[in-house]
Amino acid sequence: MSTTRSPLGSLASEVNVHGEESLSRRVPRERTHLERQATHMYKRGEETWRRLTRQRVAAFLELFLLAMVRTENAHRAGYPQPQSVEMLLGTLVQRIIRWVYRHRVWTKYEGRWPMSLEHFDELDNDLANYLPSIHEGHQWQRIREYFVDMKRVREEWRREERRREEQERRQRQVRLNQVRRVLEL
């Protein structure tokens, strides 16, 4: 075991540099992306049993989409486990959808919305395709109306903003032309 040499990347080089016992070290159990995501949520304190916030809802939606929709990253077998499905669907219906329904705020500022527009679009599409009974529920339909209105208002606001910027640009151009005329005299 040398302290000045470094291994070249092969097992033989590893044994030469660090000794025979370097190959017999235990490797931790392989974890799926879903398990790593859940661990990170726990470390950041984003569990759904805590008081819900926009950040915790976003973390749960990422976990839900990972486990229920993007199943190739969720489990080694490629399909979700029944206990996980039951817990995730129960939390979605009883906690997340209710919280989003109660915390709708009619404002243009997206930071005040209960979830991001990207999460809404993806969740709405997946609920329509895979869970139509939840998608057709009263609360989810009100949430859909809310986000459709917010999209419309945001688009109108952006259009108004572009129109205002164009008008200011024209006014600057007119003033600049007037200054040029005066200087040419």
Image (cartoon, helix red, strand yellow):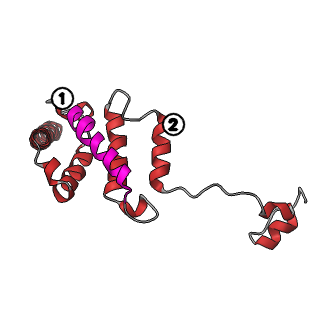
- Amino acid tagged 1: Arg
Q: Is residue 24 above or below residue 96?
A: below
Q: What separation in Å lies between label 1 and label 2 (alpha carbons)? A: 27 Å
Q: Secondary structure at mark 2?
A: helix
Q: Nearer the viewer, residue 135 or 77?
A: 77
Would you call the spot at circle 2 few (<14 residues within 10 Å), some (14-19), or many (20 or more)?
Answer: few
Is residue 159 visible in this depiction of the protein?
no
The quadrant in which the C terminus is found is top left
Q: Main secondary structure of the magenta part?
A: helix
Asked whether, in this view, residue 41 is left or right of residue 82, the answer is: right
Mark 1 = which residue?
A: 102
Is residue 139 visible in this depiction of the protein?
yes
Which residue corresponds to the image point at 87% horizontal and 68% vertical from the top-left?
A: 16
Q: Tell me residue 126's x, y (percent).
A: 22, 55
Quarter assignment of residue 175: top left
**Is-magenta flag for residue 17?**
no
Q: Secondary structure at mark 1?
A: helix
Mark 2 = which residue?
A: 43
Considering only order in the chain, which callout, 2 or 1, is on the residue closer to the N terminus?
Answer: 2
Q: What range of the chain is rendered magenta?
A: 80-100
The quadrant in which the N terminus is found is bottom right
Which residue corresponds to the image point at 84% horizontal and 61% vertical from the top-left?
A: 21
Q: Tell me residue 157's x, y (percent).
A: 12, 38
Q: Nearer the viewer, residue 84 or 168?
A: 84
Which residue corresponds to the image point at 90% horizontal and 59% vertical from the top-left?
A: 2
Q: Tell me residue 80's x, y (percent).
A: 37, 58
- Amino acid tagged 2: Lys
Q: Residue furthest front?
A: 83
Asked whether, in this view, residue 91 is left or right of residue 173, the answer is: right
Q: Residue furthest top?
A: 51
Q: Tell me residue 79's x, y (percent).
A: 37, 62
Which residue corresponds to the image point at 53% horizontal and 55% vertical from the top-left?
A: 31
